[in-house]
Each structure stands twice: as C-alpha cells, then as structure tokens.
C-alpha cells in the first residue's frame, strides 16, 4: 500500500470519491469580490524527535519527519507555505530541536512553526524561539488572516513553583496520561493580544488559527484540552468564516462550534488511540468525527502522516496523507455548515471505519 | 403459622453471608487486592519509564492508560506472527521493536507487572478471546 503521493494522485482520489456522493463538499468556490484566491499549504506536525544519547536519535520518529518532508517537496504545484504544528522535539532538548529543525529546513517554501508542549517545558521556549521567532503572531496571505497561538501554556504555579528541576517539569508534562500534568491554556496576556489583533480585521475576512492543543475541550485526562477554549472561541465567533487547525492529538478529528470549523492534523511520529477507547474514561470524541482506522502496530508508519490544506473561499479542506492507509479528505460543506469527510458521511449513509474498542 | 415463621427465620439465616461456607475474610481480600495493586503500580511505572528498552521510548508514548492494547482479546491469531499469540508475546513484540529492547520471559516479574497494569486499566470489559 505504501507509495509516494503526488498532487495529481490526490486530486484523482478526491474526484473518484466525489462520484460516490452528491454532496458538494470542498473545492466549492463561492462567488466573492476582492482579491481573495484559492491556495494550498502543507501541514506537518508532531515529529517528537527523541535523543537517545550523543548523536543517536530514535530512528522511528526520524523516519516519519524525513518522509513527510520528502513527500511534501514532491508535490506540484508547490504549496504556498509550510506549517509545522508543534512537538518538534520529545523532551525540549537543544539537540532534539536542532536535529528536527535541520530535517525540517529541507522543506521548500516559507516555514511557520507552532509551539508544542514538548518544545516548551524544558527551557520555557527559549531555544525554540531562537530557531523560530515569536511564539504568537499573525500574518495575511491571499485575503485570509492567519493567527499562530501558543496554546500550551499553563498556570504560573505549575510552571515556576511546582518542580525542583526543569528536566522534571518537562518529563511531567511529556506524559500524556500523567495526572501530575496541568491543563493547557492560551492565557490572559495572549488573549488580550488576540483581541487587539482581531479588532483590526474585518469580520468578513476569513480566519485560520493555528494552535498545538485543540481550542475546544475533548478529554481532560489526556490534555486533549485547552482550559480557556471558550474565551478564545468567543473572540473568534464574530467572524463569518473561522477555521482552527491543531496538532497534539495524533489523529483525525473535526468539529464545528458556532462559526468555527475545527480540523486536527496527524503526527509523523506515532498515532494515539481515541479517548473513548480508554475503558475507564467514557466518550470524549466530537460526534461529527468519523475516526480513522485503528493503527496496526506491525507497520511502523501506519496511522501517521501529514496533510495538504486547501483553502477555498476561506474554508479549509484537509487532505490527510496516511501512510499504509487510504487518504482521507475532510472539507467544509457550505450547505451543511460543518466539515464532513468526502467518503465517510452522515451516520445513515456512512461507510464505517474499523470499530474502536 | 408458627411453622411458617420458623421456616422464614431459617431461610434468612441460610441466606445471610455470614453463614456461607469458607468465605474469605475481609483481611484476606484486602491483602490480596493490595498485592495486586502494588504489582500493577510497578507495571504502570515500567509502562511510563523509558527504561524497558534501549532507546528511551516508553509504552505510554503510544498507549496512554494502556489504551488500544485489548487484553481481553488474547489469545488471538496475529497474522504477522503467523500463530495464535498471548498478550505477553505482543508486549515483547513492542519491547523488541519500538523500544529496541530484549524480550522478557513470560514469567519475568516485570512482564507480570506490565500485564497486571494493562488488565487493571481494562477492568470491566468482557473477555472476548480471539476478537479482532
């Protein structure tokens, strides 16, 4: 099943899937004025580069990032820019960030990076910021206003006063299911910045917001969570067209809350189970989401991957490039007012993925 | 009427737990549970530490709370192993491959601890050996 992906094959796959349904999903161009155009960008995330000792790193995670970069570079026409969604490193070490940044430096086009908790909690983002600059900022591209947030901050007490060493602080936050961790948050200071930034933008301008953690509350036990998600959402809701793209969860998720469409992206390192498969936890996945297939542990890259993001009329279509699995395409359906999968549809007509348990 | 009352009293005595033969004492049950819990706790420590293999990777990196391990489905046929395998064999597969370590004997106390932890996190799920 493994093969290199070309833009042509992806578009062909999308077109073939499109014939299975009459729903006009994604690639729908609405008539609008102004200078806005359709475009695409590449999204790579969660490579978790992990140092073993000296110059040796975990080969498995290295290969995921290398493969994503190699495939993204083969796409024609080239994407307008490349996003990296955070967790470049596993334990925030300079060696890990340098090794990951070196691999990532081979992408064609401008690279934007999002801060992940694995990049942050050793030195509180100092070395990452030397490599990638500010931790939150905005930019405009072809009529769309883009915002990059650092959503993995937490309380001052946890960050500055709880742990005897920076190494222990990093290890405590690195464990996804560790009850000693702390809920992520954007924080008051950054929310004030976001409000100021958005005050200058017309409510008709499409927004695309990048965060590492979901800007919605999914499962607190695994920190699939941002504690001040509602406050951030309230700043975004007045805009007509809002998309949030997040990493961290290592799986396909999508959702719609008011005007905000959410898409999660894949990891290149390893996949995570859906939270509702944890027998002691209960259901915690957005009901809109049709899950991806269960990961097969015998195939190292299964259930990992990267994505192309198409922006049509300011709306996001995520084309998930899944190694050892067929592509998934999740795009905003203007008629239904929410993101839907090209192939895996409403429950009554849905082609079900594998059962998760 | 008197006979009926006696029968009722007898019945109540027979049904009360204190009269069941050879019931375990609370002290026994508590001790056995705490023995299990301490081994499962050791399993959780191994699960989350990078020390099981050689590359620092921990089981919990892919399996938070031991999710997606499906202990209730073993033994089951694993086509990549070409046979019906037990849970400890899959644990060893992960130790050898993603963790780049050496397999543990089936009765190694570390393996017992890992399996105890996996089952503890899956408590309440019905046994369904062979399921895929």
Image (cartoon, rainbow, N blue to C red):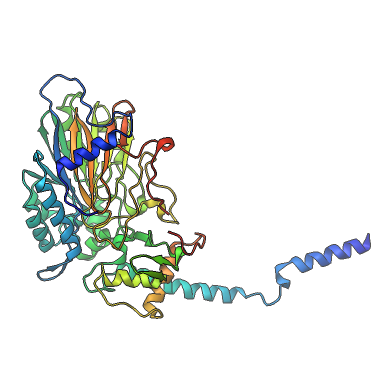
Frontmost residue, B112 versus A326 = A326
Residue at coordinates 21% horizontally, 23% vertically from top-left? A30
Q: In the visual, does A177 lie left or right of B16?
A: left
Quadrant of the rendered image containing residue A286: top left
Quadrant of the rendered image containing residue A254: top left
Quadrant of the rendered image containing residue A237: top left
A153 over A240 or under it: above or below: below
Residue at coordinates 37% horizontally, 52% vertically from top-left? A275
Frontmost residue, A111 versus B27 = A111
A105 over A315 or under it: above or below: below
* Residue A92 visible from this viewpoint: no
Frontmost residue, A154 versus A130 = A130
Q: Which quadrant would the N terminus of chain A be assigned to in this image?
A: bottom left
Residue at coordinates 6% horizontally, 43% vertically from top-left? A110
List x then y, in percent, for residue A189. Answer: 19, 41
List x then y, in percent, for residue A253. Answer: 31, 44
List x then y, in percent, for residue B120. Answer: 45, 65
Frontmost residue, A348 versus A34 = A348
* Residue A177 visible from this viewpoint: yes
């Amino acid at each position: 099943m493994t093969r290199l992906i070309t833009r042509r094959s992806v578009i062909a796959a999308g077109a073939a899937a499109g014939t299975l349904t009459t729903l006009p999903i994604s690639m729908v161009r609405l008539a609008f004025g102004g200078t806005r155009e359709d475009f695409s960008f590449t999204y790579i995330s969660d490579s978790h580069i992990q140092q073993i000792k000296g110059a040796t790193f975990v080969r498995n995670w290295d290969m995921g990032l290398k493969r994503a970069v190699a495939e993204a570079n083969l796409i024609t026409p080239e994407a307008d820019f490349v996003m990296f969604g955070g967790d470049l490193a596993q334990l925030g070490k300079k060696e890990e960030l340098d090794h990951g940044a070196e691999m990532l430096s081979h992408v064609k086009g401008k690279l934007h990076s999002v801060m992940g908790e694995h990049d942050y909690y050793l030195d509180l983002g100092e070395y990452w910021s030397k490599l990638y600059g500010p931790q939150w900022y905005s930019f405009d591209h072809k009529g769309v206003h883009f915002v990059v947030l650092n959503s993995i901050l937490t309380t001052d007490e946890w960050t500055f006063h709880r742990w005897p060493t920076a190494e222990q602080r990093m290890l405590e936050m690195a464990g996804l299911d560790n009850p000693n961790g702390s809920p992520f948050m954007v924080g008051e200071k950054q929310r004030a910045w976001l409000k100021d930034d958005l005050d200058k933008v017309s409510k008709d301008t499409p927004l695309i917001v990048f965060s590492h953690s979901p800007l919605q509350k999914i499962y607190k036990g695994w920190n699939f969570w941002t504690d001040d998600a509602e406050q951030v959402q309230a700043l975004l809701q007045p805009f007509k067209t809002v998309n949030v793209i997040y990493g961290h969860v290592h799986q396909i998720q999508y959702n719609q809350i008011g005007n905000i469409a959410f898409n999660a992206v894949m990891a290149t390192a390893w996949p995570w189970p859906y939270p509702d498969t944890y027998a002691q936890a209960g259901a915690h996945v957005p009901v809109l989401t049709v899950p991806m297939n269960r990961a097969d542990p015998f195939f190292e890259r299964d259930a990992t991957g990267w994505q192309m993001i198409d922006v049509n009329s300011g709306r996001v279509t995520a084309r998930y490039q899944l190694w050892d699995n067929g592509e998934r395409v999740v795009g905003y359906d203007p008629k239904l007012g929410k993101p839907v999968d090209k192939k895996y549809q409403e429950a009554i007509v849905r082609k079900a993925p594998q059962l998760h348990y | 009427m008197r006979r009926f009352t006696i029968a009722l009293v007898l019945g109540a005595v027979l049904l009360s737990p204190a009269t069941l033969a050879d019931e375990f004492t609370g002290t026994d049950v508590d001790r056995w549970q705490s023995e299990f819990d301490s081994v499962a706790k050791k399993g959780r420590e191994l699960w989350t530490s990078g020390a099981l293999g050689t590359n620092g990777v921990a089981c919990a990196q892919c399996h938070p709370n031991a999710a997606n391990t499906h202990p209730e489905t073993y033994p089951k046929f694993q086509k990549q192993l070409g046979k019906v395998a037990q849970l400890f064999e899959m644990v060893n597969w992960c130790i050898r491959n993603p963790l780049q370590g050496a397999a543990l004997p089936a009765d190694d106390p570390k393996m017992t601890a890992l399996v105890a932890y996996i089952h503890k996190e899956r408590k309440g799920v019905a046994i369904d050996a062979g399921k895929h």
